[in-house]
Every structure is written in C-alpha cells, then in structure tokens.
Amino acid sequence: MKTNAYAAFQENGKIGPFQIERRTMGRRDVQLEIDYCGVCHTDLHFVNNDWGMTHYPVVPGHEIVGRISAVGKEVDGFKVGQLAAVGCMIDSCGNCHSCESDLEQYCFRGFVGTYNYPTADPGGVTYGGYSKRIVCKEDFILSIPENLKVEGTAPLLCAGITTYSPLKHWGVGPQRKVGIIGLGGLGHMGVKFSHAFGAYTVMITTSPEKGEDAQKLGADEILISTDVRAMARQSGQFDFILNTIPVNHSFEPYLNLLKINGVMCVVGAPEVFRINASQLVFGRKSLTGSLIGGIAETQEMLNFCGERDIVSDVELIRMDEINEAYDRLIKSDVKYRFVIDMNSLN
Amino acid sequence: MKTNAYAAFQENGKIGPFQIERRTMGRRDVQLEIDYCGVCHTDLHFVNNDWGMTHYPVVPGHEIVGRISAVGKEVDGFKVGQLAAVGCMIDSCGNCHSCESDLEQYCFRGFVGTYNYPTADPGGVTYGGYSKRIVCKEDFILSIPENLKVEGTAPLLCAGITTYSPLKHWGVGPQRKVGIIGLGGLGHMGVKFSHAFGAYTVMITTSPEKGEDAQKLGADEILISTDVRAMARQSGQFDFILNTIPVNHSFEPYLNLLKINGVMCVVGAPEVFRINASQLVFGRKSLTGSLIGGIAETQEMLNFCGERDIVSDVELIRMDEINEAYDRLIKSDVKYRFVIDMNSLN
C-alpha cells in the first residue's frame, strides 16, 4: 500500500517528498496512521550519512505516535482507534539471551531499526516515521496513555527511554545525587525522570542561561561545568551522572564529580574518548553506556509517564519545515525536541 | 630505634644499604621483625621516580610479613610472637565516609602509604619493608594464618588483595565466565582467586607458552589475545574481565569479549586509554577500576587463603640481589613474584 513520506535522496541534499510502499498487513501486524513524529539527532546523522551506512532514499523518524487503523487477525493486544506508538526498533531475533531477557536493543543478531535497515518489505530497507502510515509487528507496538498531550509523547520513544532506562538500571532514586550533563532532547528528559524518581537532580551545563529552564524541568541545582571552582566544590559528590553530550569532550572533569563507587553513563552519540584509568582506579568508579531500552521497559516508561503526567517539551513543526529544523538542530536551537505534525503532509 | 634497610638514593641509581630510624613505640603500635618482603612493580616505579613523586632516599616494600616483637600498652588484638603483616597502607584519616565504610584505600584525605609518604616519624617520609623492622599502628596490622608457607603470603598484601577485592566486589563465582588478562604478579593471583571462587576462569595472554602454567594455577582455558579467530569465537561471552596489564594497550579487543552488562576492571598501573564509547553503549558494558582493598577485606582475604591454602608462587631472593631482580622484573622474568628473604640483610 502506497503512502506519502519525506526522504533524503543523497548526501548533503535536502529532504523532500517521496512515495513509499508499506508492506501488506500480516496476521500479527498493526497499522498506524501517524499523527506525530519526533526529530532525533540520529535522523540528521542518517540524512547526512555521517556514519557511512545510509541507504538512499532514507525516510527517517523513530519517535512515531498515531492511531491504529487496522490490526491483523491474530493481534490480541491492540484495537482499531487506540493511540499507539513505534520507537527505534521494529523487530529482533526473539530467540537470543538478550531478546529472552526483554533487552531486544542488545539482540545478538542486531535488532531491526525502524528506518534504514535491510528488510524483505518493499523498498528493501525499513522506512521510518516521516510518513503518513506504518505497518509493524504487534510485538513492537507500544500503547500510549490517553491522558497525555499527544505530540509530547513522540520523543518519549527515543529521548525518553534512552534516559529512563539507565536511570532505572543504576538505581536512581531518593537519597541519590544525580547529574545530568547537557540540556537537549535527551538531557531535558533525564532531568524530568531523575526528579520524578526522587533523586537530588543537578543539571550540569556550559550555559548559565539554561539554569531557569532546568529548574522548571525539575532540577534542584545547576552546575556550570566551565566554572572551575564550582566543579571543584562538587568533586566526589555524585552517585550517578548521565552524560548526554553528543560530541567529543573530556571526561576528566565529570569523573572527578563522582563519589567512590560512582557511575557515569554515556548515552550521547558514540565517539572515541581518552580517559585516565587512574580516575577509575582511585575510587572504584565506573564508566558505562546504555542504548534506548527494551520493548517491555519502554511500555513501563510510557505507563509511568501517564501516571506522572510526564511528556517532552516540544516545538511542533510542519513536514515542509524539516530542512529548517535540521539547520536549527545543529545549533541546538530547540526547546527541546522538534516534533512533526504529520497531518501537515498530504 | 635504628634499623638496617635498603634504599634508592637517586633517580636511575642502584638500590643499596641504608640505615633508618623507626619511630618509638606508641601505646597502640605494633613492632614487627620483618622476615619477608615482596617486590611489587610499584617499588621499581618509585625507585626510578617514574611518577615524579619520589622522595629520596626511598625504602620500598609494601608486602611485609614477620613476627611481632613488641606491642604497645593499649594493643589488644595482637601478641608478641604472632605472625603478622603490613600491606600498602599504614594509616588513614579514620573519619571520612570511606574510612567508616572499611574502604581506607579510598580515604578522602588520602591514605598514608607504607613508603614515600609524608609522616611526622623520623626521616619525614614513611620507609617500607626492605628493612629489618617496622613499627605500625595496630589498626593497620594484619594477622597471617600460621598454616601457610610464609614467604608466599607476602605478595598477598598487594598482588593478592588487588585481585581478590574486585573479583569479590563484582560477584565472581559459579556460573560466571571470568577472564584474567596478563599472567604476572597480579594475574597469577587473579587466576587463583577466580578459580577458588568457582568461576569458569580463562587466562587471557599474548604468550602461548604460559598456557601450561596457567592451567596449573587453576585456569580452565587459555585464550591467546593475538589469535584474532580465537578472540572472535569468544566475543560476547565474558561476565567479568580483570585487566592486570601494567602498560598502555588497546581496550577494544577485550571489551568485545564482554557479555551484555559485562564489566572490565582495570588494576594495572594507571595510564591514559582511548576507548570507543559505542563499545560501552552497545551492550551496557562497564569499564571500571579498583585499588588494593580495605584493611577488613585484606584480613578476610588472608583468612580465605588460610582456609583454602592459597599463597603466591614466589622466587626467593637475597636483599643484595634486588638490583638484578629489578632488571628481571622489567622483562617479566619471574614466576610470579620476587620475595626478599629479609634475614639475608644484616
């Protein structure tokens, strides 16, 4: 079935209209009419082929929310008309130890990404959420609490789960002092979740002007990372630090902030870093990383957001404003996530 | 009280006889007549001023075992004639959160090292175990099980606790697959403890000729790290890896060996490393470090060694063979720790 979409056709080109074919509904498939799609920095990396792995034309988008318009015969968990979502994954092997442990994001055979991944479906690669409609296996469909502001739920599918999962995994909660480095799409969700989990939450940023916003999001304190004295005063005080910085930087000042047995988790874009092993040895500190979250945990996060009325702070754009949005994304000129109103695409 | 010792007097010089003065016994002090002192690679780093922090003359040695020859009036845990030991620390602040948590090695004010640390005692810096006698606060004295071969217990005080502590802290035991990288003073103790804890223990080394020895020490399997195919076959299989390599090297091939949620702990000499954060992100892997162990845990380790008849494999040398031993240490030509027979020093 044909559907309208937006695609990038070549490296460094603009993104524009494209018609794609979605696969025919299988017995266990769910069809979604897409209402909103979040704009993740990863979309731009694929559009620009920054990681050398883009198959053009690429239809980005993995923060997808909409209404179910059809369900396969054997689908029992979802109904037509229900608010639902697709995140970063649309399939995995289902049999490996990771998949059996609800950690599909670490599938031994590699999960199938929502876009730009090889598939037997029409087109040969998966097409993402910059489109009117998507068909996806029931097991990778998520349900969205109806009480939330819908456009704000889209970024939960990537920025949300990417920050929720490590904060949960490393036991963030009351009596813990937690730092969130970087106030962007990921960082603003990190502050909201850390605060919601009851931790004393410190926004760590280079930009003093972000202080007021961070407090509105739930930060108890702001730490300006370029203020050497302020950083020294907080040395050895943090239980956990979530590092959302998407570009190369020195880890040293942040590892200094950790307590004995403290953990810093990297969720920004993967890069090569230099670290001094003595910073880990003297204090038994850990440096770790985390990738999105499994499907069950993503549903748990969405339910938690429903209970606590948590959504992303978004700026709604029309589909034809995407190129401009990418230009602004590069300058971090967004509070804090662009979301495309897919009803603006004919 | 004067006592004979061996010291290094200048950078790149030889180590030779020196007379030091030990402090007068305090009420809570214990005096030890030193029988054996292990030779740690750190000794050589201090002798050569590799870390730019040596105060000459330096009397190295922090793997010290002997008989108690005197106890202060208020000492109640030790008796004259008892076999006892001093490890890497002789004091700490006692009041910080680390000290109160039996983690004196991470004392906020810095522990007082057994040698080369500022002190109010005669000489102005602490003098280590390359000497006939030492006086130390009761709280930092350890008791040695009498059933063990005494010279083999000396390296337990550094090489032993440095490997025991992280293996315990990260839950090494049955049903765990554990890699020990590097078969030297630390590595050979790592293999012994991992095996004793019931883990499936793999010796990871560049040297195929070390295989037979590693199996005698308790390794279930040998993995040659230069064998690309063998390394690929074991990719994603290890729960925990203890990295004892004392020189700069690439972490990438070892991080590849870790399972999802796997941990690699660095205990070799601190260096600056380059790591690719994606190796941590894809698999929620952790890179961490660990420094010796607290006094209570060191005593626990010594008791465990007594119960399980575990000592280091050592090569006994005379005090006047120390310069030759250092030359051999640089070439890793020792199985697996030199121990000085202090009775060879007049």
Image (cartoon, coloured by chain):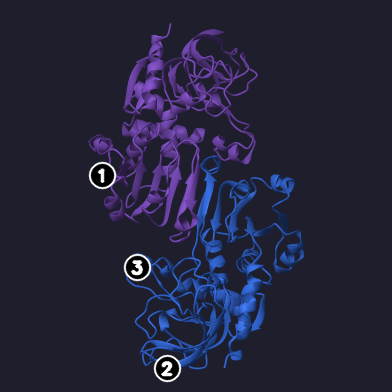
Chain colours: A blue, B purple
Q: Position of residue A274 (x, y in %)?
A: 53, 48
Report the residue marked by disc 2.
A1
Q: Mark 3 vs mark 2: same chain? A: yes
- Residue A3, x across and y down, in percent: 48, 91
Q: Quadrant of the N terminus of chain B?
A: top right
Location of residue B157 by image quarter: top left
- From mark 1 to mark 3, how far is it between C-alphas? 28 Å
Q: Which residue is mark 3?
A: A109
Residue type pointed to by label 1:
Asp
Vertical side of A295 occupied by B181: above or below: above
Give B214 or B277, whichever is nearer the viewer: B277
Q: Chain of mark 3?
A: A
- Look at label 3 and name its amino acid: Arg
User: Disc 1, disc 3: CB below 8 Å?
Assistant: no
SS for dot 2: loop
Q: Position of residue B205 (x, y in %)?
A: 32, 40
Marked residue nearer the N-terminal end (3 or 2) = 2
User: Would you call the spot at circle 3 few (<14 residues within 10 Å), some (14-19), or many (20 or more)?
Assistant: some
Instruction: Name the one closer to the observer, A192 or B75.
Output: A192
- Label 3, label 2: how far apart the Cα atoms are: 29 Å
Residue B220 is tagged as: 1
